[in-house]
Image (cartoon, coloured by chain):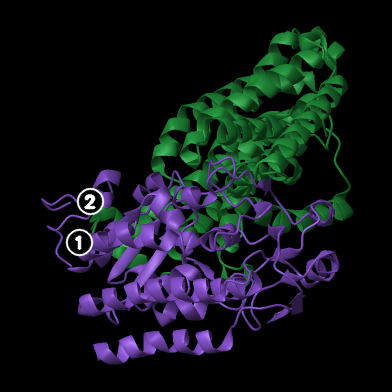
Amino acid sequence: MWTDTTSPLQTAKMDNRFGALAVTLCALALSALFTLIFGLRETSLSDLWSSFTAFDATSHTHVVIQEIRLPRLVGATLAGAALGIAGALMQGMTRNPLADPGLLGINAGASIGVVICIMVLGITDPAGFIWVALAGAVVAAILVFFLGGGSQGSPARLILAGAAVSALFLALSRGLLLISQQTLDVYRFWVLGGFDGIQFDTIWVLLPFFASGTILAIIATLSLNALMLGDDVAKGLGVRIGLAQVTIGFSIVVLCGATVAMAGPIAFVGLIVPHLARWAAGADMRWMVGFSACFGACLLIAADLLGRLPLFGGNMQAGVMAALIGGPVLIWLVRQHGVRKL
Amino acid sequence: MRYVLAIIAMLPAIHSSLAYADGYPVEIKHEYGSAVIDQKPERIVSLSFIGHDFLLALDEVPVALRYWYGTDPYGVWPWAQDALGDATPIVMQGEIDVERIAALDPDLIVGQWSGMSARDYALLSQIAPTIGPAQGAEDYGMAWQDMLRVLGQATGKANKANQIVNRIETRFADLRDAHLPWQGAGAVMVWAGQVGTFTNRDIRGQFLEELGFVVPDAINEMGSANNFYVLMPPEDISPIDTDLLIWIDAGGSVPKLHDMPLRPLMRAYQEGREIYADPLLSAALSHSSPLSLDYALDRLVPLIEAAIDGDPTTIVPSSEEAGIVRPLNGG
């Protein structure tokens, strides 16, 4: 299962993967279409079409589609894909099926950045949180990296360092929030994670981070397949382990930092998506990363769409919804197939 | 019509001057029971987020007051500074802290607009006579007139309280008389931070109705008991597109106004019917206290006059300063 020699079985598996990928992309397109059409305001397919071909700034329907639903869709797609990729890299690098990008301290670092920003600088506009959240995420990740033993550290030590830094930063954030009610009022909307009021301005600013993180991830997959055989085997295959780990780490930080800056901390997506992807992709990390990106995007788009249904009060945050959908799916998967080892 | 309104406005004044007389003991019935005050209170603890304004209006300085928001070290806004003078009340932040209140050794606890629970009341009323919200009123649903009259009664200043209520109600009545187009026109106050609006159960909705405006039923029906603040989904903000739209800002809300995709399509935007209430004016409206109402009216009345005419060329100055008005050459 985890070697990649060409055999008739393997060829069959390749065909399966292409089939699965086609199905996934169709699901992605379909959920994107639903996101643009369904909402509080009724819209038809022809409204959707004309909002792209002949945008009328005085039409409520066109404005809702182009300036409310479309940015949500793009935001959910980017965030879902980024979390999926980061989760796959994280689980691959640490060889731990429970690894989640949040364990690198990124969400906790972004959180404390936002808390300090609200308290000290008095910024209350979420658009102003982008840079502090990103900075907080990077600082936390660097701290975790060095506490985890730098490039010589073992994955286990890295996760322990991440857990320790996360706990410390979250405790600090909570302590500060207890002191200031006003900060809490602004913070609690951010911390739920979601795409309410997201603007294309924010997306354009963060797009370079998503793009560079994805490119780094693709580069990293080339050595990840070898790395997952164990450090010694990888060394034997000529992989420079330190460099590979730094590339992977950098990719995770950039992707997750941009996501948390855009939509607040969204837990669980990075954990569950690689497990779903493994079911379709097998052990090859190149496929894993691709499927994780698609599944992550699908999951968050669906979560955002369902969260807007009247059933869930009309504005349930995507982060909460993703866990509500993903949880049962993960349980089913584990009971059905067991947790597949990397 | 205007005479009828004036007479109606005077009715509660006549009624209350008959009902309340000075002299102890005083019994005050409220939502959670009744408070019996044996003698004039000397150590008042105010748990109502706006209660200190009401006490200060009666020249009563509480020993401790509840911090709501703002930057003043004593939790008091500019309109109440003169009344506070050199006094340095203890400022209580966060939730109701029964132990701390007991240590203050109060002889009256005021919790009309405090969100206190029945459980809080059960504890607090063992420390000192405690005044909750009026019977049937919601946690934050008591009218300012009622809050002031009850406190006047409790502090032996019923007449003074009535005089203040009469004076401000007369001011409202005169404003109604002078502005017939306002009578029955739709109006809302909307907080831009998490876009939502106040129903007519809230003191801000009550303020609008005292000027003769009407909060639309569509909004009132979305609210319910103890839910006086209704969120507006970004895909449909038509309920707040009324004859008069006042944007309430607790600080930093202006960028949010620019980020509302449907706002430029509102009639209120296109016809210049929006008023931006800066944080100080917003706080005066949100307190709606005997001390803040005059300040709020002084500033707001000219703004309403500029906004309500439906003519985009009469610019609302505060909205222009905030940079939220529609450019005159189209836009």
Q: Mark 2 packing: few (<14 Cα in 10 Å), some, or many (20+)?
A: some
Q: Chain B is drawn in which colour?
A: purple
Looking at the rendered structure, the kind of residue marked 1 is Ala
Does residue B221 appear in the picture of this structure? Answer: yes
Q: Is residue B114 above or below residue A193?
A: below
Q: Is residue A171 above or below residue A67?
A: above
Looking at the rendered structure, the kind of residue marked 2 is Pro
Residue under the point 66% across and 44% down: A266
Mark 2 and mark 1 residues within 8 Å of each other at the beta carbon: yes
Tell me the subunit letter for badge 1: B
Residue under the point 18% across and 67% down: B310
The percent position of residue A315, horizontal first and vertical second, equals 56, 62
Residue under the point 85% across and 53% down: B99
Q: Is residue B171 above or below residue B80?
A: below
Q: Chain A is drawn in which colour?
A: green
Q: In this view, does B83 lie above or below A153?
A: below
Element under disc 2: helix
The Cα atoms of the two marked residues, 2 and 1, are separated by: 8 Å
Q: Mark 2 points at which residue?
A: B317
Question: Is residue B102 or residue B274 the one in the foreground?
Answer: B102
The percent position of residue A159, horizontal first and vertical second, equals 83, 26
The percent position of residue A332, horizontal first and vertical second, equals 82, 57
